Amino acid sequence: MFDIDGCLVLSDGPSGHGGSVLAGASEAIAHVRASGRSLVAFTNGSMQTSGQIAASLRSMGLDVQDSEVLTPAVVAAETMQDLYQDQPLLVFGGNGVLDDFEHRGLNLVDIDRALTGAPTRAAAVVIGWDTAFGKDKIQVAAEAILAGAKLYCTSDAPSFASKDRLNVGVSGFIAAGLSHVTDRPYRVLGKPSEESINVLSRRLHVQPSEMLIVGDDLTLECEMARRAGALGCLVTTGTHSAVDAAAAPVEQKPDFVVDNLMELVELFALSSAGTTAARG
């Protein structure tokens, strides 16, 4: 699994838009494909759909298919389907959030009707990337939560790796505010959650312990690897540095650190050579 922002690409826009491919990204993807292994590019952002993100990455020269892009909104939709089947869901976000819910035919509350005062009877409230989340939506969401709906958040990452300026998170800001208003906790469904690990395992067709998880964030990818019992690699082209990794708590420690993905390709090559020699 490769993270996207700060690992494969770096920009001030979503999924590398207006930015550049990081060193070794294309080569790392090519090496994984040549080895016969499966791969997933997993972002913690939910502004765009998987297809839009994949198209953006391909336009930058990265060989990533639509089905190989995972977002926390996809994890949320799959999780809600498992937990709530056809019960009403109050989901906030743009097309990047709603697309997979709609594709699965889940029972989505009509937010426009809810804003007029219609009862939602929601079993769950899911907060995604919704930059138009104001007072009226706070009211509707809070009333649903206080009536018994469980509160979920696609990602509560405070920010994402960016090129020149702070790229702030939105979903966690909203979920934290609703938790404050209602005095109810929220559950994160994006990285590094158990739900994300389970969906990733199904996408890669391997057990979590057989994964290599590569990313730039100790609190997301590296913690996810630790939780899953997977191999975790920190690449220092984004949020965290080798110094940060050395000082990280055990639950966020990467198994190894590289300065860029080209170093990871070199490690892949050395590992393959060692395996071939051992077999010979």
Image (tube, rainbow, N blue to C red):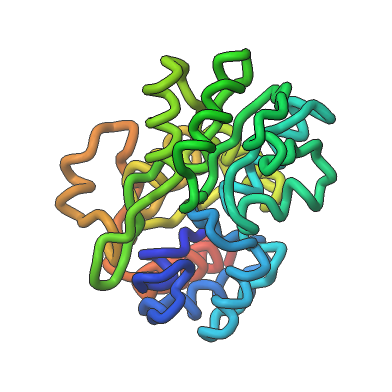
Q: Position of 105 compared to 83: left or right?
A: right
Q: Does residue 164 sit above or below 211 in this rendering?
A: below
Q: Nearer the viewer, residue 199 or 247?
A: 199
- State the image quarter where residue 160 is shown: bottom left
Q: Residue at x 63, y 37 (%)?
A: 115
User: Residue at (77%, 34%) from the top-left corner?
Assistant: 81
Q: Is residue 270 visible?
A: no
Q: How far across and down, in percent of the image, does residue 241 sit?
A: 21, 56
Q: Quadrant of residue 92?
A: top right
Labels in figure, total = 0
Which quadrant would the C terminus be assigned to in this image? bottom right
The N terminus, quarter of image: bottom right
Of residues 36 and 44, which is closer to you in this image? 44
Q: Whole-percent x and y of residue 189?
A: 55, 36
Residue at screen point 32% across, 70% down = 260
What residue do we see at 74% from left, 46% from top? 101
Locate residue 213, reporting x and y percent: 48, 52
**Residue 138: image x %, image y %?**
49, 33
